Image (cartoon, coloured by chain):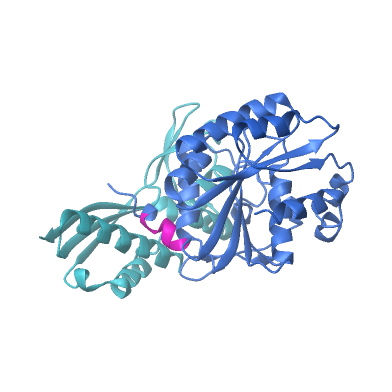
Chain colours: A cyan, B blue
Amino acid sequence: MHEWALAEAVISAVSQIAEKEGIREVTEVKVKVGELQQVEIDILEYALSQLKTEKFEKTKFSIEKAEARLKCRVCGHEWIFNKEKLDEKTAEAIHFIPEIVHTYVHCPKCDSPDFEVLEGRGVWLESIKGVK
Amino acid sequence: MVDPRISVVNERLKNIENIVAVSSGKGGVGKSLVASTLALTLAKKGCKTGLFDLDFTSPSTHLILGVQEMQPKEEKGIIPPEVYGLKYMSIVYYSGNQVTPLRGADVSNALIELLAITRWEKLDFLVVDMPPGIGDATLDLLRLVKNVKFLVITTPSRLAFETVRKLVSLLRGLEIPIVGIVENMKMDDSKFIQTQVKNLGLPFLGEIPFDNKIEDAIGNVDKLLETVFAKKVESIAAKL
């Protein structure tokens, strides 16, 4: 239920933005979830539904997955992260701290651990809509 | 695009009375040993204490404490396991003591992740073992964590102290409290560091003599707490 902590972060961040923007009622929140972190969407959705406050009564949470694209800083090779190639313990370690990917994954072309995550790391707020 | 994790960082730390970052300008001055021994000493005195190793690329507090295979409990986040009376958190639970090469942005991301998902219970002290210098982890801690104070470690080396001067200048510019400066690995009776600290207008918390028995105590907490080093750290802990 590590997703619960991330859901709390989403609710807290949206509440802070709504407060700042003078939004009384949040109608839509778009969340992007990077595949590197392997977040269980249904658990995240459940946690969001349980953590909702009054401001979120009519909120539609739209959660979209984003492929994790990695790019080697040494040879420039780009590839998509695939958790199926990892054992359960490794996949779980990356789930908790996505940067641990640098411990276990190397560039498939030149074997370097020096790569960047171009997209699809973790949980991001894409947009918020509401009534002022 | 907004990173939601940042909004919960201080919520996660709200039950901690004192957050003490053990820091230095240079590496190799004994930060991790001071941080670990300080945390153990505070716990021994009856304070609820946590130890958080933020040196992600070169963690070493787990070696000092002799932490073996262990995993944090997952409960709406992660709960730091208890080790020798300390709530202990380190990246090694996940990296398994293997090489973890991280660039600055990755260090920031890992730091924010751990701050956002770790559920610390009510603590009197959270001792943070910082990586050396004024890089990403230090800047992020300063940016994200309210109420952090710094305990700065130096050696008798003038080079080490020059880097401390820069760290102090940064902290002062940001109005971050500095608990004081500790001189570690002292080998003679020079008062150079003590005088320099006084000139900076900061508390000199004490000197720790070079202890050639300390290496034999790495990984053995009972032995560590019996060293001359630990006795000196105990007197420093009393000043916090």
**Closer to the camera, B138 or B174?**
B174
The answer to which image quadrant residue B116 occupies is: bottom left
A11 relative to B236 in the view: left or right: left
Q: Residue at x 86, y 49 (%)?
A: B228
Residue B216 within the segment the image draws in magenta: no
A54 relative to B103 in the view: left or right: left
The answer to which image quadrant residue A17 occupies is: bottom left
**Where does residue A28 sit, x and y in percent of width and height?**
18, 61
A75 relative to B215 in the view: left or right: left
The image quadrant where one finds the N terminus of chain A is: bottom left
Up the image or down, A118 lies above or below A96; here it is: above
| Magenta-highlighted residues | B7-12
**Where does residue B2 sit, x and y in percent of width and height?**
30, 49
Regarding residue A5, the answer to whether it shows in the image is yes
Considering the whole magenta stretch, tell me its main secondary structure.
helix
**Closer to the camera, A8 or B149?**
B149
Up the image or down, A1 lies above or below A106; here it is: below
**Where does residue B83 sit, x and y in percent of width and height?**
70, 64
